[in-house]
Image: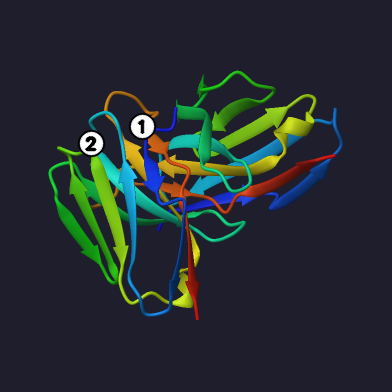
Amino acid sequence: SQQGEEDPQALSIQEGENATMNCSYKTSINNLQWYRQNSGRGLVHLILIRSNEREKHSGRLRVTLDTSKKSSSLLITASRAADTASYFCATDHSGSARQLTFGSGTQLTVLP
Amino acid sequence: SQTIHQWPATLVQPVGSPLSLECTVEGTSNPNLYWYRQAAGRGLQLLFYSVGIGQISSEVPQNLSASRPQDRQFILSSKKLLLSDSGFYLCAGKWVDGRGYNEQFFGPGTRLTVL
């Protein structure tokens, strides 16, 4: 079953605003990864945060991880129209090659 | 750098016809490889994964099969396609990079339409 679940399912904002997407999961993880998917394209890896990390930055992206609440958030600052895409979180679990479990994604629309 | 290739990019097939989608990995060795299917507007469903040549694990019972004839080649097949096999198929690979990160990377995908 899909363990990482994103919230909200859809988000529409104006260019320049910040966008925040959340992800919740159920069982312990090794790390959590965020991906971006433009319509009809493959997934692009954005950022990985390990279970012993609380916050990570990459350019305009900021990811936080709260293992006590089993949740993560992805913040995109100063959004641009080109940020319009679906964003997925994926949880990485120990024990087998089948480690990444994806949620159903958040569709972000940034209006110019 | 590592790259995942998939072909074809799009495919339209009649019901009952066979299928073969190919995925190859460049720039790394001994990756874990994965086939996912994504329905329109939905998340990813893991279909198969492989930790090595000839080693295939199936996640869900279905009309599809997978094979790994070479270390960096992963093939998704079907003998007879069903309408429900339509979707976006993504190949992914996982390996440990120079920073010790175990990230998973995706190919560009194949859009399959079964008519």
> Where is B109 relative to B22, above or below?
below
Task: Determine the residue positioned at 47% across, 72% down.
Answer: A110
Chain containing the residue with disc 2? A
Q: Which residue is mark 2?
A: A30
Residue B90 occupies quadrant: top right
At numbered mark 2, what does the secondary structure look like: helix, strand or loop?
loop
The image's mark for residue A99 is 1
**Residue B78 visible in the snapshot:** yes
In the rendered structure, the answer to whether residue B90 lies left or right of residue B1 reads right
**Crowd around label 1: few <14 · some 14–19 · many ≥20 (10 Å):** some
Amino acid type shown at disc 1: Gln
Q: Nearer the viewer, residue A64 or B28?
A: A64
Query: Chain under label 1?
Result: A
Q: Nearest the camera: B77 or B73? A: B77
- Do the numbered discs 2 and 1 sit on residues whose CB atoms are within 8 Å? yes
Instruction: Determine the residue located farthest toward the top in the rendered image.
Output: B61
- Residue B13, percent from left and from top: 83, 40
